[in-house]
Image: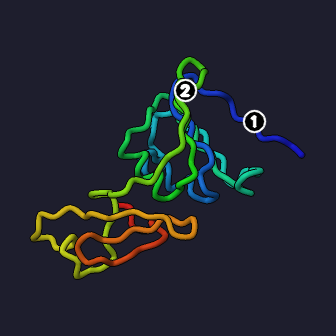
């Protein structure tokens, strides 16, 4: 079997064990688009002994924030974050979906108070795991959502 070789980064973030097919959404969460000046490496559908297939994102010169971590945990709860300094792993950890997120998800219920333009209300969702899938329940209308990638604002 041939191996895919992606060069190491000197300083930045490596996000490994991303659920297959979610790497583009991770780039969107990180605010990386076609006009970025950052050096970005991305691999999708890479063979993985644990996951079958996975995605990997490497970003030179960017250290991920807690807010971005929470969003990534919602779409890929098994992701691993590696913070790299001088080509060495300075810190490695797994993301953990937060219990509550505010202003991260948009409620799909058009009648929910969090969608009313006249109300100064931030969306609030309670996060839980059901059958290895991250789900969220709206604080205001109690609507339950799955496939959270569709609702990240």
Which element carries disc 1, helix, strand or loop? loop
Measured as percent of width and height from the top left, residue 19 is found at 61, 56
* Quarter-of-image position of residue 151: bottom left
Query: Are the residues tagged 1 and 2 within 8 Å (C-beta)?
Result: no
Residue drawn 58% across the image and 25% down it: 89
Q: Nearer the viewer, residue 128 or 81?
A: 128
Residue drawn 39% across the image and 53% down it: 98
Measured as percent of width and height from the top left, residue 76 is found at 54, 55
Q: CA distance from mark 1 to mark 2?
A: 18 Å
Residue 124, compared with residue 82, is above or below; it is below
Residue 55, compared with residue 105, is above or below; it is above
**Local crowd size for mark 1, using a 10 Å CA cut-off: few (<14), some (14–19), many (≥20):** few
Residue drawn 32% across the image and 67% down it: 106
Seen from this angle, which residue lies furthest top?
86
**Local crowd size for mark 2, using a 10 Å CA cut-off: few (<14), some (14–19), many (≥20):** many
Measured as percent of width and height from the top left, residue 139 is found at 26, 69
Residue drawn 23% across the image and 77% down it: 112
Q: How is the image coloured?
A: rainbow
Residue 15, compared with residue 115, is above or below; it is above
Seen from this angle, which residue lies furthest right?
1
Instruction: Name the image quarter holding the C terminus.
Output: bottom left
Which element carries disc 2, helix, strand or loop? strand
Mark number displayed over residue 84: 2
Count the numbered circles shown: 2
* Quarter-of-image position of residue 52: bottom right
Observer-side mark, 1 or 2, equals 2
Seen from this angle, which residue lies furthest bottom?
111
**Label whose residue precedes the other's in the sequence (1 or 2):** 1
Q: Nearer the viewer, residue 34 or 106?
A: 106
Q: Nearer the viewer, residue 104 or 141?
A: 141
Mark number displayed over residue 5: 1
Mark number displayed over residue 89: none
């Amino acid at each position: 079997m041939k191996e895919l070789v992606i060069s190491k980064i000197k300083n930045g973030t490596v996000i490994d064990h991303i659920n297959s097919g979610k790497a583009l959404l991770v780039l969107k969460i990180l605010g990386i688009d076609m006009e970025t000046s950052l050096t970005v490496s991305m691999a999708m559908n890479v063979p993985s002994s644990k996951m079958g297939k996975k995605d990997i994102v490497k970003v030179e010169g960017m250290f991920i924030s807690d807010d971005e971590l929470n969003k990534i945990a919602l779409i890929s709860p098994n992701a691993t974050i590696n913070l790299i300094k001088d080509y060495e792993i300075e810190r490695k950890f797994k993301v953990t979906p937060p219990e509550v997120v505010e202003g991260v998800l948009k409620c799909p219920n058009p009648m929910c108070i969090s969608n009313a333009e006249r109300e100064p209300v931030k969306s609030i969702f309670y996060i839980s795991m059901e059958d290895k899938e991250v789900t969220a329940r709206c604080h205001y209308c109690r609507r339950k959502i799955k496939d959270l990638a569709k609702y990240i604002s």
